[in-house]
Structures are given as C-alpha cells and as structure tokens.
C-alpha cells in the first residue's frame, strides 16, 4: 500500500556462505512499517530519507508520556494517556541495531522515500530455529515471502498439532489465535480482534497513514544534544532498557581513515555502539573519491556483506588458492559478500564509490597487503 520490501535470495551461495539474509525496505511518505520481530539479530542502514523508529523491549517502562493528554483524558473520563517506550528520529547514514526478538516499527515522516537496507544474522547463536530467518508480524497482512524463506523451502515449516485450524493460512501473528481468547486477553470487543486478525487483503505490511500520525518524540535538536552527551560515556552505565540503538556513520568528523585525495572509512563497533557486543555485528561505511583506490586487504575475523549505496567502480576478490572469485564492475544497489580471509581491492569510477559493509563480528579487523602498515612491509627483507 505504501512501499515495497525486496529480498535477496537467501539460498544464493554467497549468502549461504556468510549465513546471513539481506532485504531492503522502500517506505513512501506517510508509510508505516507495521510492528514485527525476528528470530535473530538485525542491523539496519538508512540509505535515504528520514523517519521515526520505535523498538519495544520486554519488561522496560513506558518512559515517553504526554501529561497534557493525560489531563484532558482525565477531564473527559475516557481513554488513558499516551505513553510508550522510547522512539528515535532516524536519518540518512544511521546504523540501527535491533536485538533478537525485539518488536519494532518504522514511520516515514519525511518528504521523500525512506530506504533502509538490513542484514539478518541467521548464524547468530540467538537463533534457535533453522538456518533461515523468520519475520513475525504483529499487524498488517504479510505475504508468505515476508515471513521467512524456510516456508518456501520446507513447505510451510512447523505445522503444530492437528485440529488447529490449518497451519498454512497466511497472516499476522494474531490470525492464528481464537478471537474469543484474544478478546478476553486484551479485554476488548471481539469485533476489534477480528479487524486485527483479518486486515484488508491489499494493505500488506507497509500501510499508508491517512490522518495525522501522532507519537511522542523529542525534536531532532534535542536528540543530537543527547547523542553528544552519550558519546562521552564508556558504555558501563548503559542498561538493557536504555541501550543506544542508533549511530550515524555518515558524519565525516567520525572517520577512522581519511585521505583528502582518496576518501574516508568510518566504522561502528562494540566500542562506539555497545549494543553491538550483544549482537556480535559491526559495520563500515566507505567513501572513495573519483578514481581512488583502496589497498588490497582481508577480514581477519568476519565475513563482510557489502551494499553499494552510491556511485560505481570495480572490485576484485581473490580466494585462498589465488583465483579471482569476483572481478567486475559494481554499482549502486548491488550486494556482494566478501568471505573471511578473502583478499579484496576496490577502485572508484569517475563518479566516486560509496558502500556500507555489514560485518559478522562486533570488533571486525582487517589486515593490509600493501601500504604503510601492511603485512608485506612488516616482514623481514630476507623473508
């Protein structure tokens, strides 16, 4: 209704090698991605646009409260105040970390399309199911493809006991429950449960919000002040309920490697986003200027899943036996997996080259084949 979700084939040998899944959301203006959770950790990158992101953690308090609304509702003797867990303003360049099983939603409150690319770490130890990711939707009317590759590969996966009303129906999580049981559990009218279980067929998982979308959230300037204060913390004070989930990796002032003629590379790992220690993931944002070149290098302790965000160029990947497993042009929107230990070199075209790399280690490390701090330079001459 208000956007598209695109999946890379998880049975592709590249993704099977890294034991990950990758998908992309394109959310139109005023589009709402309905709440959902997965069976493993996720890492999002905002490619374009801005919006609002909310995540719900079990047992955590609803710290966002509207006092004005509370007073008006008390005077009217009706509905209670609006209160919910923390929400975040997101924008281009943000990395968003999402722990296993945390329900989350996204709303596009910007003036253009909101595009996010996400990595799902199926090989994470938190995943106690099979080697396919599954998406559990708490609303909308998801297509079978959106609920996990395992359903297509294994004929629907776990069916449960007989007499349960048919395990092959598609829908959100509430669809499988008896409406009377849910009505009692929520203490609401059964008609409301029926609407929740069987939304309009054409709506999907990204729905258009026709009226004003009202949610409690600090202004962007206030959030930036809070971020600057949090950058001084060491992560020890961080608790489960107050975990920082977002880090902007596009800020040039945060670059780890910079050359005014070549470009810059910025990383986010467990040290500047402590939640990544739990997720066992990290990310790297690269920006090569016109015709610039990265030195050949390899990843010591992780796979690298590279998504080209802008520009074009050439990439070459070499395996342990000296074969070039990839040698070709790369362009915006393309996804490439660089396995652990495989050497890689990138060269930008005259349009430049930008990428985001998701890495399957919370403290990913690389080693250079050429350059000032390379392994070749560190070897004795006789060797």
Image (cartoon, rainbow, N blue to C red):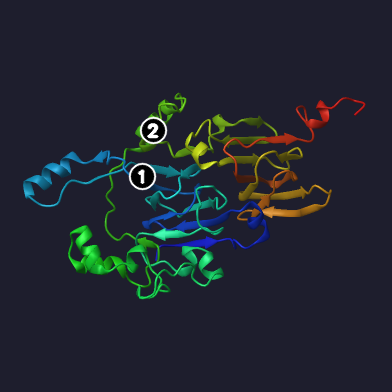
User: Label 2 belongs to which residue?
Assistant: 239
User: Label 1 belongs to which residue?
Assistant: 57
User: Where the C terminus falls, by quadrant?
Assistant: top right
Circle 1 residues within 10 Å: few <14, some 14–19, many ≥20: some
- The extreme front residue here reads 161
- In the rendered image, the vertical position of residue 196 relative to residue 106, given as above or below: below
Q: Position of residue 359 (x, y in %)?
A: 60, 43
What is the C-alpha distance between the residues marked 1 and 2?
12 Å
Q: Position of residue 132 (x, y in %)?
A: 54, 59
**Residue 293 seen in the current view:** no
- In the rendered image, the vertical position of residue 321 relative to residue 234, given as above or below: below
| Element carrying mark 2 | loop
Q: Which mark is residue 290?
A: none
- Report which quarter residue 27 is drawn in: bottom left
| Element carrying mark 1 | loop
Along the line of sight, the residue nearer the viewer: 113 or 381: 381
Q: Look at 44% across and 70% down and name the residue there.
A: 159
């Amino acid at each position: 209704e208000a956007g598209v979700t695109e999946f890379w084939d998880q049975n592709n040998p590249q993704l099977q090698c890294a034991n990950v899944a990758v998908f992309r959301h394109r959310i139109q203006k005023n589009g709402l991605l309905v709440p959902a959770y997965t069976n493993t950790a996720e890492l999002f990158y905002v490619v374009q646009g801005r919006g609002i992101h909310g995540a719900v953690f079990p047992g955590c308090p609803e710290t966002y409260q509207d006092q004005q609304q509370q007073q008006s509702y008390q005077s009217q003797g009706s509905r209670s105040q609006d209160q919910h867990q923390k929400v975040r303003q997101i924008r281009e360049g943000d990395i968003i970390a999402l722990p296993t099983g945390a329900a989350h939603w996204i709303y596009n409150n910007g003036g253009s399309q909101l595009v996010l690319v996400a990595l799902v770490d199926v090989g994470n130890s938190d995943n106690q199911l099979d080697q396919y990711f599954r998406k559990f939707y708490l609303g909308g009317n998801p297509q079978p493809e959106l609920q996990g590759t395992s359903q297509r590969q294994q004929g629907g996966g776990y069916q449960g006991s007989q007499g349960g009303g048919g395990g092959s129906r598609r829908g959100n999580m509430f669809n499988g429950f008896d409406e009377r049981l849910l009505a009692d559990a929520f203490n609401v009218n059964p008609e409301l449960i029926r609407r929740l279980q069987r939304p309009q067929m054409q709506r999907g998982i990204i729905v258009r919000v026709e009226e004003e979308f009202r949610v409690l959230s600090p202004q962007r300037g206030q959030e930036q002040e809070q971020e600057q204060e949090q950058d001084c913390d060491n992560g020890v004070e961080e608790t489960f309920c107050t975990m920082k989930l977002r880090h902007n990796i596009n800020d040039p002032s945060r670059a780890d490697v910079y050359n005014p003629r070549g470009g810059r590379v910025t990383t986010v790992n467990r040290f500047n986003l402590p939640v990544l220690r739990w997720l066992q993931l990290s990310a790297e944002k690269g920006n090569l200027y016109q015709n610039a070149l990265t030195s050949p290098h390899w990843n010591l302790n992780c796979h690298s899943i590279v998504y080209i965000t802008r520009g074009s160029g050439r990439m070459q990947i070499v395996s342990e036996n000296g074969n070039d497993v990839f040698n070709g042009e790369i362009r915006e929107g393309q996804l490439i997996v660089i396995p652990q230990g495989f050497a890689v070199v990138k060269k930008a075209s005259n349009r430049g080259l930008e990428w985001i790399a998701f890495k399957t280690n919370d403290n990913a490390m690389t080693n250079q084949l050429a350059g000032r701090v390379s392994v070749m330079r560190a070897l004795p001459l006789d060797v």
